Amino acid sequence: MENLRIGVVDIAHDDQTTNDHLSCSVCTWRLGVSPREYALRLARRHDESHQNGPRRARPGGPERTT
Protein backbone atom coordinates (compact mmCIF):
# COMPACT_ATOMS: atom_id res chain seq x y z
CA MET A 1 0.00 0.00 0.00
CA GLU A 2 1.05 3.54 -0.55
CA ASN A 3 1.67 6.42 1.84
CA LEU A 4 -0.86 9.24 1.66
CA ARG A 5 -1.40 12.80 2.84
CA ILE A 6 -4.84 14.16 3.70
CA GLY A 7 -4.59 17.86 4.44
CA VAL A 8 -2.24 18.14 7.43
CA VAL A 9 -2.26 14.39 8.17
CA ASP A 10 0.37 12.00 6.83
CA ILE A 11 -0.56 8.32 6.55
CA ALA A 12 2.36 5.89 6.39
CA HIS A 13 1.61 2.21 5.78
CA ASP A 14 3.67 -0.47 7.53
CA ASP A 15 3.76 -3.58 5.34
CA GLN A 16 4.92 -5.83 8.19
CA THR A 17 2.13 -4.98 10.65
CA THR A 18 -0.40 -3.88 7.98
CA ASN A 19 -1.15 -0.85 10.17
CA ASP A 20 -1.39 2.72 8.98
CA HIS A 21 0.41 5.28 11.12
CA LEU A 22 -1.21 8.72 11.14
CA SER A 23 0.64 11.87 12.18
CA CYS A 24 -0.38 15.52 12.10
CA SER A 25 2.00 18.22 10.86
CA VAL A 26 0.20 20.88 12.96
CA CYS A 27 -0.11 19.29 16.41
CA THR A 28 1.21 16.26 18.32
CA TRP A 29 -1.63 13.92 17.25
CA ARG A 30 -0.42 10.44 16.25
CA LEU A 31 -2.30 7.21 15.83
CA GLY A 32 -1.72 3.71 14.47
CA VAL A 33 -4.78 1.93 13.11
CA SER A 34 -6.02 -0.72 10.73
CA PRO A 35 -7.85 -1.26 8.37
CA ARG A 36 -7.14 1.40 5.76
CA GLU A 37 -10.76 2.63 5.51
CA TYR A 38 -10.76 3.43 9.24
CA ALA A 39 -7.42 5.24 8.97
CA LEU A 40 -8.69 7.38 6.10
CA ARG A 41 -11.88 8.32 7.99
CA LEU A 42 -9.91 9.34 11.10
CA ALA A 43 -7.39 11.29 9.02
CA ARG A 44 -10.17 13.27 7.29
CA ARG A 45 -11.89 14.00 10.62
CA HIS A 46 -8.64 15.19 12.22
CA ASP A 47 -7.77 17.37 9.23
CA GLU A 48 -11.22 18.97 9.38
CA SER A 49 -10.70 19.75 13.07
CA HIS A 50 -7.85 22.06 12.07
CA GLN A 51 -9.88 23.77 9.34
CA ASN A 52 -13.08 24.52 11.28
CA GLY A 53 -11.97 27.50 13.32
CA PRO A 54 -10.38 27.67 16.75
CA ARG A 55 -11.40 24.16 17.82
CA ARG A 56 -8.29 22.03 18.35
CA ALA A 57 -7.94 18.26 18.39
CA ARG A 58 -6.85 16.62 21.62
CA PRO A 59 -3.11 15.86 21.65
CA GLY A 60 -2.49 12.12 21.62
CA GLY A 61 -5.86 11.02 20.34
CA PRO A 62 -8.64 11.65 17.88
CA GLU A 63 -11.29 14.21 18.65
CA ARG A 64 -14.47 12.67 20.04
CA THR A 65 -17.91 13.64 18.92
CA THR A 66 -20.42 12.26 21.39
Image (cartoon, helix red, strand yellow):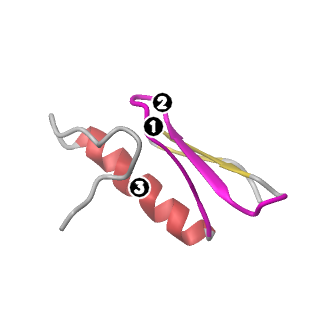
Q: Residues within 10 Å of mark 3 (few under 14, many from 20)?
A: some
Q: Is residue 40 above or below residue 29?
A: below
How many angstroms separate mark 1 from mark 3 (CA)? 9 Å
Q: Position of residue 25 (x, y in %)?
A: 48, 30
Residue type (three-letter) at the residue carrying disc 3: Arg
Residue at (75, 63) in percent of width and height: 18
Residue type (three-letter) at the residue carrying disc 1: Val
Residue 42 in the figure: left or right of residue 23: left
Quadrant into which the N terminus falls:
bottom right
Number of numbered discs visible in the structure rendering: 3
Q: Position of residue 54 (x, y in %)?
A: 15, 34
Q: Residues within 10 Å of mark 2 (few under 14, many from 20)?
A: few
How many angstroms separate mark 2 from mark 1 (CA)? 5 Å
Label at residue 16? none
Quadrant into which the C terminus falls:
bottom left
Would you identify the image quadrant in which residue 35 lies?
Answer: bottom right
Residue underneath mark 1: 8
Q: Does the stretch in magenta take in 53?
A: no
Residue 10 in the figure: left or right of residue 44: right
Residue underneath mark 2: 25
Q: Is residue 30 above or below residue 28?
A: below
The span picked out in magenta is 16-34
Q: Residues within 10 Å of mark 1 (few under 14, many from 20)?
A: some
Residue at (53, 61) in percent of width and height: 39
Residue 20 in the figure: left or right of residue 58: right
Q: Position of residue 42 (x, y in %)?
A: 43, 59
Q: Does the stretch in magenta take in 19?
A: yes
Residue at (26, 59) in percent of width and height: 64
Q: Are marks 2 and 1 in contact (CB under 8 Å)?
A: yes
How many angstroms separate mark 2 from mark 3 (CA)? 14 Å
Label at residue 44? 3
